[in-house]
Image (spheres, rainbow, N blue to C red):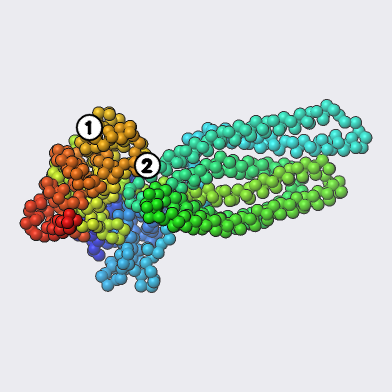
């Protein structure tokens, strides 16, 4: 067991940390637990060590930094995980005094660390072998509890309306435009409230006196009418300006949100994509971001306007007649209570709807790219049923929410009508008592009509707000996820890569399943290594680890003596040429696909790479040669042609390291022979790790590494391994026997 994976009950510190820890830990202190951290507070890759003694919690950084927190009854330790990043928060008197961050590769040690901290805080002795541990996370179990509290922790949080405020980070660059839009909103709202105010003198000083025989003052009438027209024109101009400005801003916020989310997706490790559906991610980037954009451009603006109108209207109403104004507020408590009840139901309902809709998208993203397989197996009806079922379930979920919403909206309308009736009744009573004039009542009714209209509009915005909140949560679920393959805090430069690769006690797990264990291998610069073994032996996993698509769970991989986790990821991968078992072509021309890793390559360089991969001849037979479209995912080409373009793409960047994962599995025998001849020249001066389906293609490898169940069982060249008559010999004989049967 490596130092990194050790965790004994009286734990010995890792060798690399023993000297720094000895300088900090007093002789009288007893180490109770430790685990290694691998992220800084800024979520950059950097090693650290957290140590729990009987006196304090200590954290050492690889740059020499030291933090410590003395144990006390007030010191608490909280463990959390979100988006692939674990966190330990140290709290004292309810305030956070420290924080440790780590990837989930170190989460098991962190859970044990917390368990020992809690046992120490309770005055207990160190854990003993007699204590039962959780079979999943190995946390010591409390005999009084039926299940592991660590595993039972609820990680899912329902969407909250407060999530929408996180969009401010995207709105911040447009503060000036937003300020202009807000000023226009305030001014236009004020302008819309002027006409009802002018109706009071029109009624009380012009129309009612005219009915009593007083002549109409034409000058005053024209003045009031001009005021009404001017207010309408000002409101129109300002309303157009605020709508235009805020719509432009919201579109840019939506575009920035999509760009940031997509770029963040590109930065995540393959582990994240392995647990996601393509349709779900497309739905989040597409429909969810559009929903947020519509909310910001339309509904958020309407909400702000509604609030301003209601506040200004309320102020005017109370200035006109406080008692009549109070009568208008009678329905408000009931409406507020209804909004609270409905909001709680809609909050989770709309998130469920977004997930259900993403399932509809998933069916489309599965079926359309795989339409050839669907038709080949005559499964059109089956896929139609899948889509029907997903669409039907989406309809049912919508119906459930619509039943709630359908009752809520008419109820709010009824309450506002009742409120208007109360105002009429109370207003007529006050007119009869000569407490207000008819003009005041008319203006009041005009204002209260606007007030209730805005109140009804605000109640309806509950639906779109909860939809936008659910959409924002799904977007921020992506943005909050931190890659399990983080960039180093201080990257080590590698100006000249020689290609010396060393694997030291490498181990890796997919979840709880161990894939490779205790892999130790030294690959010299320019050496060609063949990885062989049965399916599932861990060959492709090793290639993925060498590319740093995943990070090792145990041990380390070194390039020219430097741990690859200390190298800048883009700089590291620029030195690797990768040819996958299933070649992927992007929609575009042949030349574009070959030059994907080097977009500025000249046509001569592209042709040279194609010649080296024995692709030049078939490319010239295409209708437009190097400018021919390959179709989506290369459907216009055969499997062997796609594979040769993939090899040309890897060769164009002239890498120091070649990784060939079943690079010749999709070609016929004749084409394979041509590629093998080209590879004999190409591997010279490059470190090459090759996985091949046919063992005969690896006979000229310098060494063959035989894997069984994630472990190395044999190493040697072809002749040496045949003489050993071991695992490789059995594989070779079985393949030769099958080949003979096929030839017969």
Direction from residue 109 to residue 393 in the image, left or right: right
Quarter of the C terminus within the rendering: bottom left
Q: Which residue is drawn at 11% across and 60% down?
A: 726
Please tell me in which quadrant of the rendered image residue 216 appears: top right
SS category of the residue bearing label 1: helix
Query: In the depicted view, which residue is nearer to us: 707 or 602?
Result: 602
Figure check: 310 above or below 52: above
Query: In the depicted view, which residue is nearer to us: 649 or 261?
Result: 649
* Mark 2 Cα-neighbour bin, 10 Å: few <14, some 14–19, many ≥20: few
Quickly name the residue at label 1.
608
Residue 151 drawn at (x, y percent): 37, 63
Q: Do the residues labelled 1 and 2 touch (CB within 8 Å)?
A: no
Residue 411 drawn at (x, y percent): 68, 56
* Mark 1 Cα-neighbour bin, 10 Å: few <14, some 14–19, many ≥20: some
Q: Which residue is drawn at 82% across and 30% down?
A: 221
Please tell me in which quadrant of the rendered image residue 265 appears: top left
Residue 500 drawn at (x, y percent): 16, 43
Residue 207 drawn at (x, y percent): 86, 36
Direction from residue 445 to residue 537 in the image, left or right: left
Direction from residue 200 to residue 136 in the image, left or right: left
Direction from residue 113 to residue 478 in the image, left or right: right
Q: Which of marks 1 and 2 is nearer the N terminus?
A: 1
Figure check: 716 above or below 150: above
User: Is residue 661 visible in the rendered structure shown here?
Assistant: no
Figure check: 49 above or below 180: below
Please tell me in which quadrant of the rendered image residue 120 appears: bottom left
User: Is residue 242 visible in the rendered structure shown here?
Assistant: yes
Q: Residue at x 90, y 37 (%)?
A: 211
Q: Residue 632 carries which label?
A: 2
Q: Residue at x 57, y 43 (%)?
A: 300
SS category of the residue bearing label 2: helix
């Amino acid at each position: 067991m490596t130092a990194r994976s050790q965790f004994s009950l009286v734990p010995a510190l890792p060798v690399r940390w023993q000297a720094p820890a000895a300088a900090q830990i007093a002789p009288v202190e007893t180490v109770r637990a430790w685990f290694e951290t691998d992220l800084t507070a800024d979520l950059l890759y950097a090693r650290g060590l957290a140590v729990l003694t009987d006196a304090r919690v200590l954290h050492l950084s690889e740059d020499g930094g030291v933090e410590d927190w003395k144990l006390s009854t007030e010191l608490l330790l909280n463990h959390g995980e979100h988006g692939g990043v674990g966190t330990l928060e140290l709290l004292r008197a309810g305030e956070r005094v420290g924080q440790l961050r780590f990837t989930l590769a170190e989460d098991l040690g962190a859970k044990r660390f917390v368990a020992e901290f809690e046992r120490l805080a309770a005055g207990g002795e160190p854990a003993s072998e007699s204590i039962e541990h959780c079979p999943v996370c190995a946390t010591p179990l409390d005999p009084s509890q039926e299940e592991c509290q660590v595993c039972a922790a609820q990680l899912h949080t329902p969407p909250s309306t407060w999530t929408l405020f996180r969009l401010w980070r995207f709105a911040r660059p447009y503060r000036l435009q937003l300020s202009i839009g807000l000023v226009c909103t305030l001014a236009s709202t004020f302008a819309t409230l002027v006409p009802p105010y002018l109706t009071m003198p029109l009624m009380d000083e012009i129309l009612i006196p005219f009915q009593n025989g007083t002549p109409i003052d034409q000058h005053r009438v024209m003045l009031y009418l001009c005021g009404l027209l001017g207010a309408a024109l000002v409101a129109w101009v300002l309303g157009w300006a605020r709508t235009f400005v805020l719509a432009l801003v919201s579109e840019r916020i939506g575009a920035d949100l999509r760009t940031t989310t997509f770029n963040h997706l590109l930065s995540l490790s393959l582990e994240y994509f392995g647990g996601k559906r393509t349709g779900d991610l497309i739905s989040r980037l597409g429909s969810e971001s559009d929903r947020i954009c519509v909310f910001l451009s339309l509904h958020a603006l309407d909400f702000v306007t509604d609030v301003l109108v209601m506040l200004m209207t309320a102020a005017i109403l109370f200035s006109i007649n406080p008692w009549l104004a109070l009568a208008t507020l009678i329905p408000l408590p009931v409406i507020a209570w209804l909004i609270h009840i409905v909001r709680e139901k809609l909050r989770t309902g709309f998130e469920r709807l977004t997930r259900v809709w993403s399932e509809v998208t998933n069916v489309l993203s599965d079926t359309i790219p795989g339409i050839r397989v669907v038709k080949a197996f005559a499964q059109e009806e089956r896929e139609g049923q899948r889509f029907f079922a997903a669409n039907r379930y989406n309809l049912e979920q919508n119906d459930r929410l619509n039943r709630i919403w359908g009752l809520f909206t008419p109820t709010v309308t009824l309450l506002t009508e009742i409120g208007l009736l109360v105002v009429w009744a109370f207003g007529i009573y006050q007119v009869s008592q000569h407490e207000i004039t008819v003009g005041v009542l008319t203006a009041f009714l005009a204002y209260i009509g606007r007030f209730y209209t805005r109140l009804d509009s605000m109640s309806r915005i509950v639906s779109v707000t909860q939809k936008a909140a659910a959409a924002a949560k799904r977007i921020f679920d992506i943005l909050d996820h931190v890659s399990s393959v983080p960039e180093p805090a201080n990257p080590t430069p590698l100006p000249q890569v020689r290609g010396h690769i060393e694997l030291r006690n490498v181990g890796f797990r997919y979840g709880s399943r161990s894939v490779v264990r205790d892999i130790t291998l030294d690959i010299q610069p320019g050496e060609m290594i063949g990885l062989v073994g049965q399916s599932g032996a861990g060959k492709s996993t090793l290639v993925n680890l060498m590319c740093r698509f995943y990070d090792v769970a145990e041990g380390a991989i070194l390039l020219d003596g430097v741990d690859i986790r200390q190298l800048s990821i883009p700089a590291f991968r620029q030195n690797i040429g990768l040819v996958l078992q299933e070649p992927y072509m992007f929609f575009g021309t042949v030349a574009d696909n070959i030059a994907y890793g080097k977009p500025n390559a000249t046509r001569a360089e592209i042709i040279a790479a194609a010649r080296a991969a024995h692709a030049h001849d078939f490319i010239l037979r295409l209708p437009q040669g190097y400018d021919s479209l390959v179709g989506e995912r290369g459907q216009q080409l055969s499997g062997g042609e796609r594979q040769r373009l993939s090899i040309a793409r890897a060769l164009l960047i002239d890498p120091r390291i070649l990784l060939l994962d079943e690079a010749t599995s999709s070609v016929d025998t004749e084409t394979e022979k041509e590629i093998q001849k080209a590879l004999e020249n190409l591997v010279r001066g490059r470190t090459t790790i090759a996985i091949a389906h046919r063992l005969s293609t690896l006979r000229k490898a310098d060494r063959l590494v035989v894997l069984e169940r994630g472990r190395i069982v044999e190493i040697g060249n072809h002749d040496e391994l045949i003489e050993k008559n071991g695992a490789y010999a059995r594989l070779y004989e079985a393949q030769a026997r099958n080949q003979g049967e096929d030839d017969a």
